Structure formats: structure tokens, C-alpha cells
Amino acid sequence: MKSVLAVAVAAGALWAMPITPAAAQGDPYRWCAEFGGGNDGGSSNCYFITRAQCEATVAGVGGFCRHNQFYTGPETAYGNDDAPPRRVEKKRTTR
């Protein structure tokens, strides 16, 4: 009798839990590499977080990089460059 009561309490607890739909994750990949094209069709690879990653992939094999039209992540204040401007260290002078 105790096991039946335990199962009933567990089922009631699960039934009372709020169920929320899963939120869709945004596309984290900002850059796409485009290969080929023309009459041959071509292909694309949209799994690059930075432009440098994309350019390293198309270097030597041909193609170009473009913004991923499905990217839904945060925008950066750096334009097409994905890294902040370099901080230049000032030379220290001794007094």
C-alpha cells in the first residue's frame, strides 16, 4: 500500500510541474564561406564565428566570406571586424 501511495504522490508532483516550451537558440555563427558557384552549383559553410576563421578556410581554395543571413546573435560595435581595436601600449619614460 505504501508503494502505491508513493507512486501516486510522485505522479502528482510531476503533473503539477510547470511545462515550458524550449526556447530556440539563435544562430551563433556570424560568417559563411561561399565556394564555387556558376553552372557547377557551389556550396556554403556557415559555421564560422569570426571573419578570420572564414577567410582562413577559403584561402587557397577560392571562395569568399559573407555575413550569415540567419545570424541572430548580438551585433558588435566593430563593424566587419570581429575583434576590438588593438590597444597600443605607450612607451614608458623614466624620470
Image (tube, grey):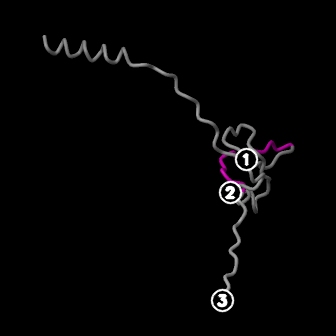
Q: Which residue corresponds to the image point at 65% horizontal and 47% vertical from the top-left?
A: 47
- Residue at image location 59% in from the left, 35% down from the top: 25
Q: Residue at x 78, y 51 (%)?
A: 79
Q: Nearer the viewer, residue 92 or 74?
A: 92
| Quarter that holds the C terminus | bottom right
Of tags 2 and 3, the one toward the viewer is: 3
Q: Amino acid at mark 1?
A: Cys
Left/right of residue 79 with respect to residue 16 in the rendered view: right
The picture places residue 38, in percent across and down from the top left corner, at 86, 44
* Element class at badge 1: strand
Q: Label 3's element?
A: loop
Tag 2's secondary structure?
A: helix
Q: Position of residue 39 (x, y in %)?
A: 86, 43
Confirm or deny contact between disc 2 and disc 1 (CB under 8 A): no
> What span is colored magenta in the figure?
39-51
Q: Which image quadrant for residue 19?
A: top left
Is residue 94 shown above or below 72? below
3 vs 23, left or right, is left
- At label 3, which amino acid type do we have? Arg
Which of the numbered marks, if any, corresponds to residue 32?
A: 1
Magenta includes 77?
no
Instruction: Of the two numbered discs 2 and 1 on the same chain, state the one appearing first in sequence.
Output: 1
**Circle 3 residue:** 95
Q: Amino acid at mark 2?
A: Gln
* Label 2 to label 3: alpha-carbon separation: 45 Å
Q: Quadrant of residue 13?
A: top left
Image vertical order of residue 55 relative to residue 86, above or below: above
**Circle number at residue 53:** 2
Number of numbered discs on residues: 3
* Disc 1 residue crowd, few under 14, some 14–19, many 20+, Cα 10 Å: many
Q: Mark 2 or 3 closer to N-term?
A: 2
